[in-house]
Image (cartoon, rainbow, N blue to C red):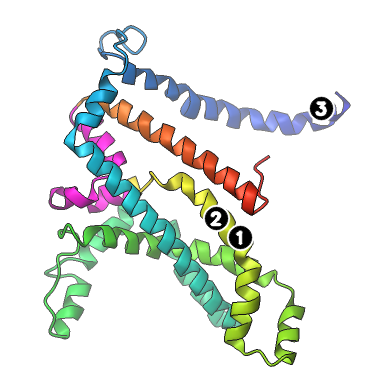
């Protein structure tokens, strides 16, 4: 009680945030009951009759469902793997730069796209990747190559999503890994230099082993995003031509639930995704605690 009396102003400051969280995060979760109802907008959520798991059976009978699940897992796994390799590699390169002004300039440039929304970046990429007037096509034509319809070729579209997502976000990951690298004891490098180790050997035997815990931590925590392939990105870049390889769970929910007004099936798909994500997140935290000694509480 004495401790609470000393800290009550801090608890009071948390009240507005808790109220907002309850109103906009927890209260809307009551709407998941629609997945088990024959929803009637006139009767509302609490007045519509319960019909059980029929909508979940319809969800798995839809031809787009399994395809969307496969695309989601495929795209998100590629984003996770490539999105970890590129920041690590770039952080190692930046660590070798000794000119501080140049180093900070590069950090700022690669970090800047992280703050832009996919609405802005989507418009930029549509123009840049245009097969007729885009910058990439112009460069390809200058070298005598045939331009490619990057956002209209089903086989290429998932790779475009991965590359553009990594381009947008790898600056943040680079800062994280660079911070881990700068915390390494300089005495280890001095001892390695005395032993005759070159730069490459120092990276292999000192830098990489020292940042393995943060790599394991971020890798295990990223398991919770296996079913999050990037709704904002896909919605702003994909079209009907690439739906076969670009349609993910979130765009399926958007199309079925909001555009086609099948609220029950859309809710069922979203609830299925959330349940699977909880399993992956729980597994990720367990692995983080098991192998990286990371605990949330």
Q: Is residue 16 above or below residue 208?
A: above
Q: Nearer the viewer, residue 151 or 19?
A: 151
Rounded to the nearest angstrom, the CA distance separating label 1 from label 3 is 35 Å
> Would residue 270 be found to the left or right of residue 18 on screen?
left
Mark with earlier residue (1, 3): 3
Q: Nearer the viewer, residue 26 or 77?
A: 77
- The image shows residue 112 at horizontal and vertical percentages of 45, 64
Instruction: Tell me the tag on residue 218.
Output: 2
Rounded to the nearest angstrom, the CA distance separating label 2 from label 3 is 35 Å
Residue drawn at 47 percent across, 41 percent down? 280
Instruction: Tell me the tag on residue 4.
Output: 3
Q: Nearer the viewer, mark 2 or mark 3?
A: 2
> Would residue 284 be found to the left or right of residue 137 on screen?
right
Q: Secondary structure at mark 3?
A: helix
Q: Are marks 1 and 2 in contact (CB under 8 Å)?
A: yes
Q: Quadrant of the C terminus?
A: top right
- The image shows residue 149 at horizontal and vertical percentages of 14, 65
Residue drawn at 63 percent across, 70 percent down? 209
């Amino acid at each position: 009680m004495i401790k609470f009396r000393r800290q009550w102003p801090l608890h009071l400051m948390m009240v507005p945030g808790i109220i907002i969280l309850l109103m906009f995060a927890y209260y809307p979760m009551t709407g998941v009951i629609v997945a088990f109802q024959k929803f009637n907008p006139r009767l509302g959520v609490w007045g519509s009759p319960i019909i059980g798991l029929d909508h979940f059976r319809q969800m798995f009978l839809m031809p787009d469902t399994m395809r969307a699940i496969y695309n989601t897992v495929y795209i998100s796994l590629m984003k996770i793997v490539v999105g970890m390799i590129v920041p690590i590699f770039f952080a190692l390169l930046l660590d070798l730069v000794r000119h501080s002004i140049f180093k900070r300039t590069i950090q700022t440039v690669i970090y800047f796209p992280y703050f832009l929304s996919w609405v802005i970046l989507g418009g930029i990429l549509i123009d840049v990747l245009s097969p007729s007037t885009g910058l990439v096509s112009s460069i390809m034509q200058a070298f005598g190559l045939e331009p490619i319809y990057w956002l209209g070729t089903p086989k290429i579209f998932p790779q475009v999503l991965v590359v553009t997502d990594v381009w947008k976000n790898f600056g943040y990951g680079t800062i994280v890994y660079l911070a881990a690298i700068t915390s390494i004891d300089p005495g280890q490098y001095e001892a390695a230099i005395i032993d005759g180790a070159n730069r490459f050997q120092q990276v292999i035997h000192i830098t990489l082993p020292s940042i393995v815990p943060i790599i394991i931590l971020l890798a295990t925590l990223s398991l919770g995003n296996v079913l999050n392939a990037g709704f904002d990105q896909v919605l702003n870049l994909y079209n009907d031509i690439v739906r076969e390889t670009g349609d993910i769970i979130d765009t399926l929910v958007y199309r079925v639930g909001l555009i086609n007004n099948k609220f029950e099936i859309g809710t069922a798909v979203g609830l299925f995704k959330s349940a699977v994500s909880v399993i992956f997140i729980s597994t990720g935290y367990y692995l983080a605690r098991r192998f990286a000694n990371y605990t949330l509480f």
